[in-house]
Image (cartoon, coloured by chain):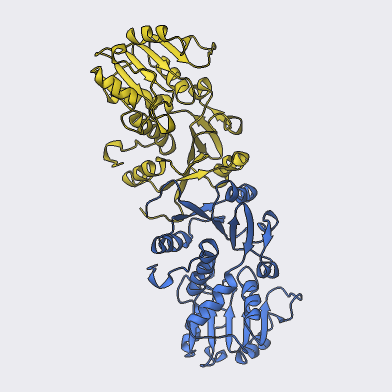
Chain colours: A yellow, B blue
Amino acid sequence: MEIDGHTKLVGLIAHPAGHSKSPAMHNAAFDQDEINARFLAFDVEPDQLPAAVNALRAFKMLGASVSMPFKQAVIPLLDHLDKTAELVGAVNTVVNHDGELTGYTTDGIGFVEALKDNGVSLSGQTMTLAGVGGAGTPIAIQAALSGLKTLNVFNVNEQTDCHATFYPLEDRDQFKQSISESDVYTDATGLGMGKLIDKTLVDDPGWFHQDMTVFDTVYAPSVTKLMGVANQAHVAHVINGQGMLLNQGAAAFKLWTGQEMPLKDLSL
Amino acid sequence: MEIDGHTKLVGLIAHPAGHSKSPAMHNAAFDQDEINARFLAFDVEPDQLPAAVNALRAFKMLGASVSMPFKQAVIPLLDHLDKTAELVGAVNTVVNHDGELTGYTTDGIGFVEALKDNGVSLSGQTMTLAGVGGAGTPIAIQAALSGLKTLNVFNVNEQTDCHATFYPLEDRDQFKQSISESDVYTDATGLGMGKLIDKTLVDDPGWFHQDMTVFDTVYAPSVTKLMGVANQAHVAHVINGQGMLLNQGAAAFKLWTGQEMPLKDLSL
């Protein structure tokens, strides 16, 4: 579908933004669904964030994806905040309804949907979660909303404003114990990628059991060191962050367009 | 060339904007020249103009085209103004150099280049120009800068801040006389399109002579009533606004990208 005078814009607002896979994903989906729109990534300087948000209104954009470092900073610039985004305290998706901007978070939905795609339901389950930063917080909230029974969170900095049980990551015995009692272990620390590619919080396959799920939010490399350890332990479901990324994108796509993202037809 | 995280944006800022041919022209040229950029048209509400201009900085856009009704209003929002744009008092092209916005006008260049494409030079010539609105003013200025000897301007409202001679359009005898003495007659009134499709300032072929040029800035329809009259008079060069449109676009394209627009390779 060629760009014409009616083509709508969706933007990624992030800093940096050039490495993003979102343009490829969303433009392929716009093509597939024959939606007259384009997705471009914008590397926005922090002092330009208000101007970038105002651009959504001025350009009558469908909306935006919001990524680091703006997921919290964008909130006071919006007109409305979805309930889950309010709970999480972060926004990764903005929808423009006639100049009224509403913030959503779809990261947690992406996590839950990625589990579903692998045949895993959180209902009544016990989960150990390492890391409650940008990825961990929406995962914790959405997991709680999806019927999780017990959540044990391990983090380098303790937090207390949640009904889940929080432990310091330094408490290795407690950490090992929690994983052994969990149906799902989720790592949202970002360890295992980039400069930390050789790092993992669990290097002993004996900490895992076969009938559990190990979920790493990292998507590159596609098999992290943690996932290698889980594979050694013959863990039933070892999942990387790719499905979470696609599903959070699909949830955002539906918010902007009202249509399903044709995930199966996309070759990414 | 697929959109990726580094794809740059250029926008049309106008109200309305949906009818614009600029997206087709510029995107075809970006493709042809393998420039990683896309051109989208934005229908900007008048009270949103400052936000639209700030978006150029926030999104690190290459620049923008500016059309009605913003060609004058945009000027105080820019950091710099090109000399010709200053003379004309209007901007149709904005270039973003690291957040510093400079306004240019390429409409006059488009006119002169379109004449050149038809083998017509203005050097030492006499021109009659009807209309000094958004299109007529840059034409008058650029024609003067291109070596025109005599310019007679006919307009419904008299103006006096120019060395050219201004006449009221109502003075039909003077108008007929001026055309008969001219090498070029240019109509920049916008008559002959839309609701005024049946209108022409000249309906008698006897007013024209064969070895002249008749230039109508209208491009749709491709042969206006005025051009029909000129054809009846067997005028040597009867030119519509299409070439002017392409050439003003090409001049803007070069300002944004530093590269020539591959006009001959574009199928528009």
Q: Vertically, is A5 above or below A101?
A: below
Left or right of residue B191, residue A93 in this image: left
Residue A116 visible somewhere in the drawing: no
Residue drawn 55% across and 64% down? B255
Q: Position of residue A76 (x, y in %)?
A: 61, 30
In the rendered picture of this protein, how many numbered marks are placed on residues? 0
Dividing the picture into quadrants, the one containing residue B130 is bottom right
Q: Position of residue B98 (x, y in %)?
A: 60, 53
Give B138 or B176, whichever is nearer the viewer. Answer: B138
Q: Position of residue A240 (x, y in %)?
A: 33, 27
Extreme-right residue of the structure: B160
Residue drawn 67% across and 84% down? B151
Give A250 or A257, whichever is nearer the viewer. Answer: A250
Residue drawn 25% across and 20% down? A232
Q: Vertically, is B22 above or below B44?
A: below
Residue A29 visible somewhere in the drawing: yes
Q: Position of residue A119 (x, y in %)?
A: 26, 21
Give A26 or A181, whichever is nearer the viewer. Answer: A181
Dividing the picture into quadrants, the one containing residue B142 is bottom right
Give B249 or A61, whichever is nearer the viewer. Answer: B249
Quadrant where the C terminus of chain A sits is top left
